Amino acid sequence: MVLDIVVAVLWSMSPFGEAKLGIPYALLNGVNKYWAFLFCFLANVLVFPIMMFFLKVINRYFFKWYYYKKSAIFIARRAKAGAGKNVKKYGFWGLMIFVLIPLPGTGVYAGTIAGYLFGLEKKQSFLANTIGIFISCAIVWGTTVAAMEGFN
């Protein structure tokens, strides 16, 4: 049980699935549905300060290297293309709506990068990401619980 929670939290912090993968993993492995939501949501929110630290401190150091710079520019362009029009036009609301869509590539990683690139205030970007993550987690959680109960 504890190991399943740890794995779900790690999936929720991973850029490969975020809570969109962590919540179903936890629920399918028998974790209490409320604990699964809480731990995966909080783990996904924790990504924002880690990413902001990375973008402001570590990114500047690694940007000196050609291959890192090339990869970072590629990722930034993808985040900007995905969220660009909405964030540029609607700011906070555009970022929140972008993050709340439970599809690959629309989570807190891309949301944090988009907020950083478009110069949103840190508190505003954090709040937009947190609300978006909460709604996205609620959609994934509700869908997974409903599907599991439907199969039983």
Image (tube, grey):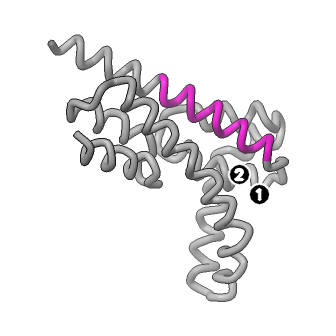
Q: Nearer the viewer, residue 10 or 16?
A: 10
Residue placed under numbered mark 1 in the picture: 117
Q: Extreme left residue here? A: 152
Q: Residue at x 62, y 71 (%)?
A: 72
Q: Quadrant of the N terminus?
A: top left
* Quarter of the figure with residue 77: bottom right
Q: Residue at position x 74%, y 68% from top?
A: 56
**What residue span does the magenta drawing correspond to?**
123-138
Q: What residue do we see at 49% from left, 33% from top?
A: 102
- Which image quarter holds the C terminus? top left
Picture coordinates of residue 30, whole percent (x, y): 21, 30
Within 10 Å of the Cα at label 1, are there few (<14), some (14-19), or many (20+) other Cα atoms? some
Q: Residues within 10 Å of mark 2 (few under 14, many from 20)?
A: many
Q: Is residue 54 above or below residue 134?
A: below
Where's residue 127, x and y in %?
A: 72, 37
Q: Label 1 near label 2: C-beta < 8 Å? A: yes
- Which label was assigned to residue 57? none
- Residue 126 locus on image (x, y percent): 71, 43
Main secondary-structure element of the magenta-colored stretch: helix
Q: Secondary structure at mark 2?
A: helix
On the picture, is 36 further left or further right than 115?
left
Please indicate whether residue 22 sits to the left or right of residue 60 in the image.
left
For the residue pair 24 and 42, the one nearer the viewer reads as 42
How many numbered discs, if any?
2
Query: Mark 1: which amino acid?
Result: Leu
